Image: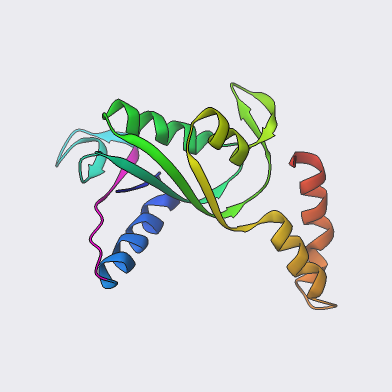
Amino acid sequence: MLFGPAYKGIALAAAVAIELARLGRTVPFAYNRKEAKDHGEGGLLVGAPLAGRVVVVDDVISAGTSVRESAGWIRRAGATPAAVVVALDRQERAAEDGVDKALSAVQYVMAELGMQAVAVATLADLLEYLSVAGAGTLAAHAAAVAAYRDRFGV
């Protein structure tokens, strides 16, 4: 099943579930809320009950905080966090309790959480794209992205 962490992961997990259904594969999904509701269905989790092997779908992975929190939700429900799929791996150092780790967030997820990790694109891919963008408006952002990588990257 799929799990979309609040907030951006919710729409992405829903979109992946819809596309899988269009292709003939029905996959349940769930997501968390940032704050519990005390009306309607209430609680912090919405959607299908977390069960079996669960894939977390999110927009980016930076320090790995969202994935660690999602894995906690999934385990507490008795399910297994199996993998994370993100649109962009920022290739940042993982951080836990405010302490930077020697591993990237993706390496941390794989080594410490035992989950597979797949990114549609990485910060290196973005920098390469910006370098071939030539003198266009996107190329003007290459230096700022490179500085970001130098400060936070592995």
Q: Is residue 91 left or right of residue 146?
A: left
Furthest toward the left, the residue is 40
Residue drawn at x 26%, y 67% as measured from the top left? 21
The image quadrant that residue 132 belongs to is bottom right
Query: Is residue 93 positioned above or below 14 on the image?
Result: above
Q: Is residue 78 left or right of residue 119?
A: left
Q: Where is residue 133? Give x, y as percent.
A: 78, 75
Q: Where is residue 74? Give x, y as percent.
A: 33, 34
Q: Is residue 36 magenta?
A: no
Q: Is residue 27 magenta?
A: yes
Q: Is residue 19 left or right of residue 125?
A: left
- Please tell me how many numbered marks the rendered image carries: 0
Q: Is residue 148 left or right of residue 59?
A: right
Residue drawn at x 78%, y 63% as measured from the top left? 141
Question: Is 78 or 42 nearer to us in this picture?
Answer: 78
Residue drawn at x 26%, y 56% as measured from the top left? 27
Q: Where is residue 82? Give x, y as percent.
A: 40, 40
Q: Where is residue 145? Give x, y as percent.
A: 77, 55
* Scheme by which the image is coloured: rainbow
Which region of the structure is painted magenta? Answer: 24-33
Q: Which corner quadrant holds the C terminus?
A: top right
The image quadrant that residue 38 belongs to is top left
The image quadrant that residue 13 belongs to is bottom left
Query: Is residue 112 positioned above or below 16 on the image?
Result: above
Query: Is residue 27 positioned above or below 5 on the image?
Result: below
